[in-house]
Amino acid sequence: MRLVRVRLQRRATEYEIAIGAGTLARLGLSARSALEADPRRLVLISNRKVFTLYGERALRSLRSVGFTVAHWLMGDGERFKNLNTLERALAFLSSTGLERNDAVVALGGGVVGDLAGTAASLYLRGLPFLQVPTTLLAQVDASVGGKVAVNTSAGKNLVGAFHHPRAVLIDTDTLETLPARELTAGWCEAIKQGAVGGRSLFEMTHKFLKGRAAGRADADALGLARLIAAHVAFKASIVAGDERENVSRTDASSRRILNFGHTVAHALEAGTNYRRFRHGEAVGYGMLVAGEISERLGLLDRSELELLRDAVRLCGRLPRAADLGEEMILSRLAHDKKSVGGHLKWVLLEGIGRARIVDGREVGRKLLRASLRAGLQGVSNRTESEGEKR
């Protein structure tokens, strides 16, 4: 088992992320260790797919150390991460009689983690919670850093809070039950972090994906745990230095660099009512568009763009996007929540591993349209996959 600590300078606190195979069996002990106020009751929030696979194991571990545990299941998918679902989750927390020293456990992917974390941040003005991410995307990114939110009709993640978990428990065995599309989404998010996090992290990820595609032994379970730990450590370092994403920062250690690929991704998700793309799949397209913008502005060599495109290709098939109207995407971009002073802030690349934050006024309309057309073509002739059931 590998351990990574997230240290929050503003609060002089930290929490631990445990990564390894079979760690779900330690959930009860981890909860007892991380929750300081000796809680009696826990509420576990999940969805039906994940709970069917791992719910009883999680409940058994929590109850073995004396917790009284109730569970509540939300719908499966980004479209359920909304205010209606949040209200129902809060009503359930109330019905169980949770008190200020009790806690919430999120068992599932990024949608479950976001919804459960938002509910925990609001109920009784803030309950502690634990993250048990079961998807690759949540393990390398969404469960780390304390951002929790829900979507509204105006856009993605517009209502939320900074509410850090008391601990994160990553069981790599849960990835064995993921459908191909969920793995693709997670690998796209990993490529995103490598593209802005440093050449070595990108190359480590790219090498693992090439080995995975070729069936090589260096893409085994131990290699996967090492890779996830490297991504978690990178994100933890960014969060430690810029916990609340200071909008005045434009340096390479700003938390805003983690938004690489997300500007277009959020537009794609919202514009298709969160039904066509997994989040990471949309990020895959977002990276391709941002790479095109970077190359057309003269920031990124063509060879580096091709390297990025190859990495996205190795992540897996993406749903089609070339049929989506430019006007729809442009209108969604105008409402991006990360705009500052009424202008978009693009995260672009000066090279693989070197991010640069660029004011939207530097990205002309004609250049943006051309980049959208090129990026949304993808990296090969692909058709939308239905994905297997988990």
Image (cartoon, rainbow, N blue to C red):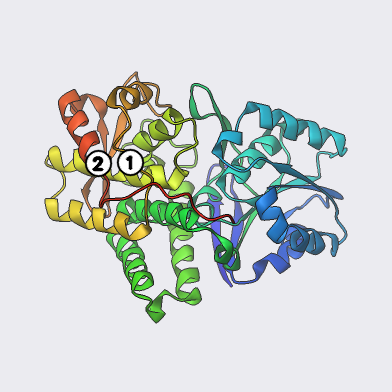
Quadrant of the frame with the C terminus: bottom right
Residue 35 showing in the rendered view: yes
Answer with mark 1 or mark 2, whichever residue precedes in sequence: 1
Which residue is found at the position 39% from the left and 46% from the top?
384
Give the camera-side residue of 194 and 334.
334
For the residues labelled 1 and 2, the Cα–Cα distance comes to: 8 Å
- Image-quadrant location for residue 370: top left
Among the 4 quarters of the image, the one containing residue 170:
bottom right
Determine contact: label 1, label 2, CB under 8 Å. Answer: yes
Q: Residue 388: x percent and y percent?
A: 53, 56
The answer to whether residue 241 is visible is no
Residue at image position (36%, 51%) is 192
For image coordinates 40% across by 81% down, the residue present is: 217
Residue 31 image point, x, y percent: 74, 58
Side of 226 relative to 104 (left or right): left
Q: Which residue is mark 1?
A: 286
Tell which of 28 and 367 is nearer to you.
Answer: 367
Q: In the rendered image of this protein, does residue 77 appear above or below residue 334? A: below
Relative to the observer, which residue lies in front, 292 or 377? 377
Question: Percent from the top left, x then y, of residue 151?
Answer: 55, 30
Residue 9, percent from left and from top: 52, 46
- Per the rendering, the mark at residue 385 is none
Marker disc for residue 375: 2
